[in-house]
Image (cartoon, rainbow, N blue to C red):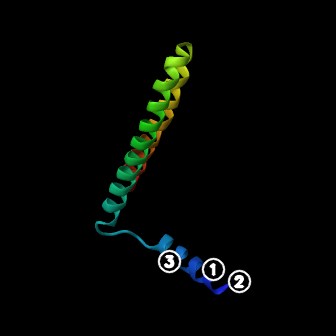
């Protein structure tokens, strides 16, 4: 095993076995919710713009556009769920 891989493996094991006792849980929960919300917002912005452009060309496909937007929003819901589990 390479030395860098061994050090990385030891760090992963040490972090996995450590218990968060103070505010680390809340920082992790806040990061999970915040970054998931940020990613979902960017995804919704891109998908929404593309859906509106496609809606002009093919209005009969509007159900699929809503499904794509809901899939992007699901990322934020997953982040909220992880945040609640961390607290």
The residue wearing badge 2 is 1
Q: Which residue is label 1 attached to? A: 5
Residue at (54, 75) in percent of width and height: 13
Question: Can residue 46 be seen at all in this image of the molecule?
Answer: yes
Dot 3 crowding, Cα within 10 Å, few <14, some 14–19, many 20+? few
In percent of width and height, residue 79 lies at: 42, 47
- Front: mark 3 or 2: 2
What residue is at 50 percent from the left and 77 percent from the top? 14
| Pointers 1 and 2 in contact (C-beta within 8 Å) | yes
Residue 59 spot, x, y in % from top left: 52, 14
Please tell me whether mark 3 sits on a helix, a strand or a loop.
Answer: helix
47 and 1: which one is in front? 47
Observer-side mark, 3 or 1, equals: 1
| Residue 34 appears left or right of 72 | left
Label 3 sits on residue: 14
Q: Along the line of sight, which residue is nearer the eye, 63 or 11? A: 63
Q: Secondary structure at mark 1?
A: helix
Visible residue check, residue 87? no
Q: CA distance from mark 3 to mark 1?
A: 14 Å
Q: Mark 3 and mark 2: span between their CA atoms?
A: 18 Å
- Work out whether 75 lies above or below 62: below
Residue 31 is left or right of residue 66, and the answer is left
**Residue visible at 51% across and 34% down in the picture:** 71
Q: Secondary structure at mark 2?
A: loop
How crowded pointer 2 is (Cα within 10 Å; few <14, some 14-19, many 20+) is rated as few
**Is the residue marked by circle 1 packed among few (<14), some (14-19), or many (20+) residues within 10 Å?**
few
Q: Is residue 19 above or below residue 26?
A: below
Relative side of 53 to 28, left or right: right
Dividing the picture into quarters, in which one does residue 2 lie? bottom right
Task: Name the residue furthest bottom.
Answer: 3
Residue found at the very far top of the displayed protein: 60
């Amino acid at each position: 095993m390479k030395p860098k891989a061994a050090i990385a493996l030891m760090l992963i094991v040490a972090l996995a076995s450590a218990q968060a006792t103070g505010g680390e849980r809340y920082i992790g929960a806040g990061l999970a919710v915040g970054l998931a919300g940020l990613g979902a917002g960017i995804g919704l912005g891109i998908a929404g713009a593309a859906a509106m452009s496609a809606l002009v060309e093919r209005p009969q496909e509007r159900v699929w556009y809503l499904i794509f937007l809901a899939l992007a929003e699901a990322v934020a819901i997953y982040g909220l769920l992880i945040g609640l589990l961390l607290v």
